[in-house]
Amino acid sequence: MASKVLLRASRDREELDPLRQDVRTFLAEQRDAGAFAPVVDSWGNGWSPSFSRALAARGWVGMTVPAAYGGAGRTFLERFAVTGELLAAGAPVSAHWVADRQIAPSLLRHGSEQQRQRFLPPITRAEEFWAIGMSEPGSGSDLASVRTRAQRVAGGWEITGTKVWTSGAHAAHFFIVLARTAPVNAGHRHRGLSQFIVPLTSPGVSISPILNMSGERHFNEVVLDEVFVGDDMLLGEEGGGWQQVTSELGFERSGPERVLSTFVLLRQAVQEIRDRHLDPDPRLGALIARIVGLHGMSRSVAHTLSRGESADVAAALVKLLGTQTEGDVVEVLGELTSEADPSVSQAMRDHFREGVMARPGFTIRGGTTQVLSGVVARGMGMR
Amino acid sequence: MSSSDMDATEDVRELAGDILADAAEPDGSGLDRAVWKLLSSSGLTDITSSGDGGWAEAAALLTQGGASAARVPVAEHDLLAGWLLRAAGLSPANGIATAGLMIDGVATNVPWAREADQLVLIGKETEDSVRVWSTSPQDCEVTPHSNLADEPRDTVRLERPTESGVVGFDVLEEFRLRLMVCRALQTAGAAYTVLELTKAYAAERVQFGRPIAQFQSVQELVATIAAEATLISVAADDAVTRVRQHSWSDPATIVGVLVAASCAGHATSIIVRNSHQVLGAMGYTMEHPLHRFTNRMLSWSADVGPLKEIDARLLAEACAGSAGDLWGLLIDSGA
């Protein structure tokens, strides 16, 4: 029986080694200068506009944006290498993360020339931050069921609805709202959705905090009450919202952030073993192996996508396994230590607590494990 | 890999796949000399020993071998025995060769020993020296044992003097690492076959008025098999890339090989459990081919030693450097 693999391994070319070294040097300088302290889940949990700007000054925000729009015109694989280094170091990349990971590619793919010229340069300078307005109280996994409505008015659109779980909305400048521009067609629920660029300071926008269980404010509820945006704020095609959202999924689901959210915790555990605060437990070796293997899968998907090929099933596989393993790091360490264990360092206790608090989100955000199993099953022809 | 390397590898993959698909006798037992002859006459059995190719091509052969559960020592003959004979300056093998580890005068778990023509054994002769012995079953006391897939894993004791040579400890270490890479590649091949068998069964088996493939709980089991099979495959391929680029003593190589062995072992456990669960009673029978693959995967994991020791060793490698350099140690290309 011929073996038909889902993904071929790919390796960084040696050309990327100097780039990785540059990022490591930068990170060491920043840490020594007190600009940041590593945290677990630093892309969800580490908001630092000053760090983002320092990164942007090195050309590492909006790296793949063409130079004409203020970017560095670098490859997708170079971005993969840089973001991996930042996440492994627990660097605070939250502020620019959404803009860098999906808004910029979206503007390049679907935006008008005027939108690209207006919005891309401030993204690459980490001067403007973005949030995502997709989920609603009644629409999470079932995104097509969103009820936020955009109604045509003179000169533009009026948007009314409620968005929820909007990370960073309270500190961001713009968000992209998925709204219904045509009534639901029962047989074709994905039709009639559009995306809009909405300034978060617009009249009619009210932002309220949603505290997570550790008492932190990342999430928000954003109520839109007849918020007006001009015609020039429609992103892409009217009615093309669903295709635009799903076309980016391969990139979003397979990135190193789906594998490395708890690497800082694992690294700290290694330090504790070196300092003889923790006994070497082979399960930690297994976790290290799995994370290296999954990073390899993430890199292989990145290679596939950068060649313009589709990798929907492989990308879902990366997130499926990666996010579970991120949580396993917390779970295994929970059997060896805790946030109250006096025999390990304060850093270990802190990172462990960060890991426990962040863990439930790993397998929920960006496509739940249950939904992804279905995506994979469909991709393999089982549904 | 250059595109011409890629072509050569794909050629081997296709050729080996065709031969193994057509010729393998799934219901037989013992070494399949007919398949060996076909592979040999196509130049596939001595890829690295002949100098015709390297690890990339050999890896393609091993993956296809694993995917077909062929009863031939494709890993042992070339990458282990053939290489050991050259490393020790001994005469090339006569016929089909296999290799094993000698400890205190006894080699256990030697694949295909009783049916091979040449037995190449490596082990510590004293605390300070390592030797390679080249012998045959006729010159040894061979006690037959079988692995979970009913393949020979015999115990061998030397009975008569035999050709041998001293090698360094690095050769012993490389032997262990080579075996890990081989088994990870074979496991990757078998894992994909298990995935195909599981998908096919779930699509055909109708209960409660529909194929069981339509039940979410079954979909989750199969999706997990696909994910774990991909993990083994990518980790094994990455190990091969590191082997091709660096020496066996380079930390980048050691890390890559241990990662592949660990991923293969843990993923095997999940794939075996999930596939048998989906295939129910049918998958539990002798008649259904599933066990040929699942039990091979488990045996190949056993061949490289307890998973706990592999994981412990990788952790030790990680702890040997500074924690701040851990990321670089794990993913860098190496020196």
Image (tube, coloured by chain):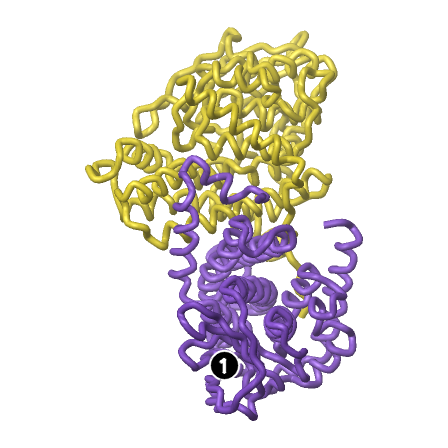
Relative placement, left or right, of B117 versus A49 is: right
Q: Position of residue A374 (x, y in %)?
A: 54, 49
Q: Quadrant of the C terminus of chain A?
A: bottom right
Q: Residue at x 53, y 77 (%)?
A: B121
| Secondary structure of residue under mark 1 | strand
Q: Quadrant of the N terminus of chain A?
A: bottom right
Q: Position of residue A348 (x, y in %)?
A: 30, 35
Rendered colour, chain A: yellow
Q: At label 1, which amino acid type do we have?
A: Arg
Q: Is residue B157 above or below residue B61?
A: below
Question: Which chain is indicated by disc 1?
Answer: B
Q: Residue at x 53, y 8 (%)?
A: A202
Between A37 and A277, the residue placed more toward the observer is: A277
Which chain does the purple colour mark?
B
Please identify the residue farthest to the bottom as the structure is shown. Answer: B138
Between B205 and A340, the residue placed more toward the observer is: A340
Between A56 and A320, the residue placed more toward the observer is: A56
Q: Is residue A168 above or below residue A329?
A: above
Evaluate whether residue B175 shows in this view: yes
Q: Position of residue A172 (x, y in %)?
A: 50, 15
Q: Which residue is mark 1?
A: B153
Mark 1 nearby-residue class (10 Å; few <14, some 14–19, many ≥20): many
Q: Residue at x 46, y 89 (%)?
A: B143
Relative placement, left or right, of A78 versus B317 is: right
Q: Is residue A175 above or below residue B303?
A: above
What number of labels is visible? 1
Evaluate whether residue A190 shows in this view: no
Between B118 and A293, the residue placed more toward the observer is: B118
Q: Is residue B40 above or below residue A107?
A: below
Quarter where residue A235 is shown = top right
